[in-house]
Image (tube, rainbow, N blue to C red):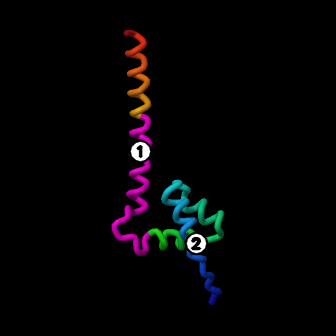
Amino acid sequence: MGKIHRIAPDLREQILKRVKDEGIPVAQAAKEHGVSEGTIYGWLGKGVKGLPTLGELVRLKRQNEELLALVGELTLEKSRTQKKS
């Protein structure tokens, strides 16, 4: 059987922060830190009561990007309208 490697809690938190807060893909974080994707997904699903799931975070990030684009469009439209006046 293979040797089990323990990941230091501070490194685990750093990896999870990058995935959750910075939007780094799990595959990229796993490769950069030498951890399996399954391990990271396990951390994401473990003991996170009351916190959004990874799917919810992805959905919220997408909605945020759509809202920012809409705000940008509205700002441009308002700017054009004010110039005409």
Specify the segment rendered in magenta. Answer: 45-69
Is 52 on the left or on the right of 10, as rendered?
A: left
- Residue at 41% from the left image edge and 45% from the top image edge: 64
Position of the N terminus by quadrant: bottom right
- Residue at 49% from the left image edge and 59% from the top image edge: 20
Instruction: Point out residue 40 in the picture as x, y percentages from the top left corner.
Output: 53, 69
Going by the numbered disc 2, the residue's amino acid type is Asp
Label at residue 15: none
Residue lying at the far top of the rendered structure: 85
Res. 32 image quadrant: bottom right
Instruction: Point out residue 81 in the picture as x, y percentages from the top left corner.
Output: 38, 16
Position of the C terminus by quadrant: top left
Res. 24 image quadrant: bottom right
Res. 67 image quadrant: top left
Q: Which residue is mark 1?
A: 64
Q: How many residues crowd around disc 2 within 10 Å: few (fewer than 14), some, or many (20 or more)? A: few
Is 43 on the left or on the right of 4, as rendered?
A: left
Instruction: Point out residue 38 in the picture as x, y percentages from the top left corner.
Output: 53, 71
Helix, strand or loop at disc 2? Answer: helix
Label at residue 10: 2
Helix, strand or loop at disc 1? Answer: helix
Instruction: Point out residue 51 in the picture as x, y percentages from the top left corner.
Output: 37, 64
- Residue at 56% from the left image edge and 75% from the top image edge: 9
Q: How many residues crowd around disc 1 within 10 Å: few (fewer than 14), some, or many (20 or more)? A: few
Is 39 on the left or on the right of 59, as rendered?
A: right
Q: Is residue 68 above or below residue 82?
A: below
Q: Is residue 30 above or below residue 6?
A: above
Residue lying at the far left of the rendered structure: 50
